[in-house]
Structure formats: structure tokens, C-alpha cells
Amino acid sequence: MMERHFEFWPERMPRSLPLPQTSVHHNLAVSAERYQEKAAIVYYGTEVSYRSLLEEVESLAGYLQREPGVSRGDRVILYLQNSPQFAVAFYAVLRIGAVVVPVNPMLVTGELEHYVEDSGAEVAVVGGELYPQLAPLVGRSGLRHVVVATYSDYLREPTDLAVPEVVSALAPAPEVADEAAVSWKAALGAGLAPEPVEVGPEDVALLPYTSGTTGRPKGCVHTHRTLQATLVGAAVWNGVTPAGVALATLPFFHVTGMQHSMNAPFYAGSTVVLMTRWDRELAARLVERHRCTHWTNISTMVVDFLANPEIEEYDLGSFEVVGGGGAPLPAAVGEKLHELTGIRYAEGYGLSETISQTHMNPPARPKLQCLGMPSFDVDARVVDPETLEELGPEAEGEILVSGPQVFRGYWKRPEADEAAFFERDGKRFFRTGDIGMYDREGYFFMVDRLKRMINAGGYKVWPSEVESTLYEHPAIQEAVVIGVPDERRGETAKAVVVLREAERGKVSEEEIVEWSRGQMAAYKYPRTVEFTDALPKSGSGKILWRELQEREQARTG
């Protein structure tokens, strides 16, 4: 196990972290007993206390257990946007020993069918605006019962905030005429108490699905113990305390938002300031109003947040830790964040298979565009992706991880497990498929996904490196780099760019190409630039470079 990073390990931080031998639901129960009237959630001005949150968890757990008959090990789909109902449903499912299957709320009926069939879920909790997408599957694929939630039920206080339409009381209430469906209010109003269920650390808790970049999405089997590893680790590493206030903007269906913006704060007794939809002006206002201390995000959110022309008018001085993952934060954006807040952006690294982080940057000594150092009890290595030979510092190869947060395997995919895992030094290592390296201080850096590298005349071009340089251009707000055919070089780089609003019509594609030529090696800089109004993004905010790549391939044949 590499130990060079311990020389720069945060002071007074344990190197190994004992994990609770209890369920994730138990974390909430403990916080609710300790901080009964403290706000667990603030939702567009409405507070939900820890006591109320636990009571609603118990009510929904009782309903799910006694009406549709959900029992230990059964899978329950959560098809909701960020809302108090997501948190209640998540902990209610765990309370009765069942398994949460979080689903991207951007999916449509045809895509949802795979998740229902593959997981074998018979029960779902769904947002009212999403119910029409799920309804055609009821009675098919085994799905037999649905609880339908209306987000405006939790707007119990008048607010001067810009509430998104999907949350507003003006949003039409969902029609729940199906005999297999029941409203959220009716489910909680049934007043059913759950029977005791003994849930231990090795019981399955969660079945998040991979993004499907290499075929149909696969379920990742996570236990209460694997969840505890990253939620407790996040709380300890980032100093999440009962005095903390977390701004929750990442979607809860995604493992980073789930662990850092919901489960870790609840474990610590913090308050979660919850947003259903991203809105940069509202986010700044909430930070100022509620004195938010922690914000875990994705780099595209930070880019947009700081692009707000009025951002300097807000008081952001309450921030203590700002960080995230998903994609490297461009250096120029990180410097602007530091100038504005005094906070250095702390990136992390993880996957659905590791239920968020395996690596984190120390908040007091982060490095920009860096994955960080291996987290508590994680053994991370870099190997040649073909031979699996271990490589030393500053050598590029595939990142391997072994640690308490690594999933138990893919749901009903033994052939995928065989390709993803291998044993070394008495440990089970997971092959991430990510190309990276570590420096002589033990910090890891991403180079790129194995399949994203551009081969330009024999030279390897890593799109993330080119993108990082493009972000230094003052007119560029967002950029993504893809590979395009080139008669002479075989393949070359193309940049798809979103300009800052004030720069549109003033800067040409050719000017960006010429600027790039002076900023990077001849084989790296993009030979073509395409302007667009917006880049396609996933529900978690990641730029969908693959969609742009496939579109380009279809265009060029």
C-alpha cells in the first residue's frame, strides 16, 4: 500500500477510520434523538426538523411494509427529483431492510423499463411530474405499486425565493387514478407503524446503476457498510459537524449528491439547504441567507455559479469547504473562486462502484485538477492496462482501488465482475477504467477515460488537458473536446464551446483556434471550433462528451 501521501495527510486526521456496525438508517435515528427540533432540511424557506423527518420516515416505512408488502432485500425504485420526499423515501426503504434503486429523473419510459426489469423492483416512489413516464410500466415488468409525491406539499411557509415551477404550488397535482398508485399524503396518512427489522452492515442497501457508457447500465451492489465508508469518511475529512449547513445542489439519485449532500450531513446532525433545480442566482442567495458552510458540486456548477455577473454582490464568507468531482475544475475557474471566497476548490474522485470518493484533496492543501490522495483505508495503484504491471510515480496507467467502499459486484453480472476485479497482495482490486498517475507526493491525477483518448498522428491527446487550457480564454464559459477524423493525422481534436454571454458575436471560431495554437503543443490544439448555446449534460451535471462524439461521427460518416 502506497504511503507517500501520509507525509501531507491533514493534521490530527486519523489514517484509518473505524466504521459503524449499524445501518445507515440508524445514523438518522441517532441524529433525530440528539437534535430533535433542529432543522434537518430547509426547502425553499420551509424547515423540516430532525424529529419530523424521522416520524415521516417511520410512517412511510410502515406503509411500504404493510400495504405493498415490501420486505428485507426487496428493491424499491426512487424516481424523484431532489426533495424532502427523496430523503424520507430513502431512509424508509432502508428502515425495513429493503434496497434503494435510485433512478435518474431525466429518464423516459423506454429507458426506465431496463431499471425495473433488471432490478426486479415491484414498488416505486415517484415524483408527480414523472408519474406519466412510469405509469405505462405498472403491471408490466413486475412493477405493481407506486407512491406518487407532490413536491409542493413541503412548501409550508410563504417564501420570497424563486421556486422552480415543478415545486411551486401552482404546478398541477398528478392524477393518480390507477388502482396500483397512491398519493404521498395518503401513504403517510395511513398511520401505519413498521415492524422491527434487524439490519446489519453487510445487508444490501443500495443498487445504483452505472451510466451505461459501455453497454446497458449495470447495477452496483452496495451494502450499509460500503455506504458508511464514504458518508462517514466525507464527514470526518471535510469537518461536517452539527453546526454545518450543506448546500445541496447535486441530485440525490447520484452517489456524490446522495453521500455528501444528504447522508453525511444527516450523520453529523447538519442542516441541508435543498434545491430541486440548479439556479445560480438562487444558490448564491441561499448561501448568503443560511450561511452555508459546505458545498459539494460538479465543476460545471462552479463555472456557472461564478459566471453570474452579480456574484460579487453576495456574501459568500460562510463557506468552509467547496469541492466536488466528475470532471477537473479548470485552473482559471479555481483561481476566481479563491479570489472571491478565499476557498481553494478541493476535488475528489470516485465512481458509482465506490459509492462516491476513493480519493480526496485535503482542504488545507488541495491541488487543482487533482483527484486527491487515497481516502481512509484505500489502497490505490496505477498499472499498465494491458499487463497489469504496477507503475511508479508520474507514469500514466489505469487506476486500481481496494477499500471498504468498493461495491460487492454487479447485480446478476458475474461475467462483468470477472473483468472488473482481480486479486493482488491478498486484496480484491477494482479496475476503474480511468487513466491516471500519481505524483511524488502521492496525489493522483486523472488523464482520461480509456476510451476517450484521441490518437492524433501517433500522439496521445487527452481531451481533459485541452479543455483545461481552453477555460483560460476569457471569452469561454464552457468547452468540451472530442475526436474528429483527419485525412493526414487519422484523428484530431475539435472543441465545442459555449461563449460567455457578453462575448457572443464578438469572438470567432477561428480566433479561438489561433489562440489555442499559442497555448499548447501543435499536436494538441483543436483544429476546429464549434460554437453552441449549451452543452448536453447528464442529470448530475456532467457534460455528455460521448453524445457530442456520436453526433460528430454520424455527421462525418
Image (tube, rainbow, N blue to C red):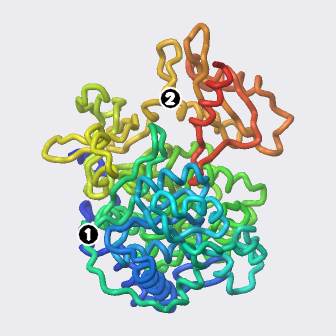
Mark sitting earlier along the chain (1/2)? 1
Q: Is residue 205 above or below residue 193?
A: above
Badge 1: residue crowd in 10 Å (few <14, some 14–19, many ≥20):
some
Residue topped by disc 2: 462
Sort mark 2 into few (<14), some (14-19) or many (20+) by Cα contacts within 10 Å. many
Percent coordinates x, y for residue 231 in the rendering: 38, 66
Looking at the image, which residue is at 54% across and 63% down?
A: 138
Q: Nearer the viewer, residue 87 or 297?
A: 87
Q: Please name the amino acid that badge 2 sits on.
A: Trp
Residue 130 placement: quadrant: bottom right
Q: In this orientation, which residue lies closer to the viewer: 508 or 163?
A: 163
In front: label 1 or label 2: 1
Q: Secondary structure at mark 2?
A: loop
Residue ranking furthest to the top: 488
Name the residue tied to disc 1: 201
Q: Residue at x 50, y 71 (%)?
A: 145
- Counting from the top left corner in percent of width and height, residue 264 is at 43, 70
State the separation of the CA atoms marked 1 and 2.
40 Å
- Quadrant that contains the C terminus: top right
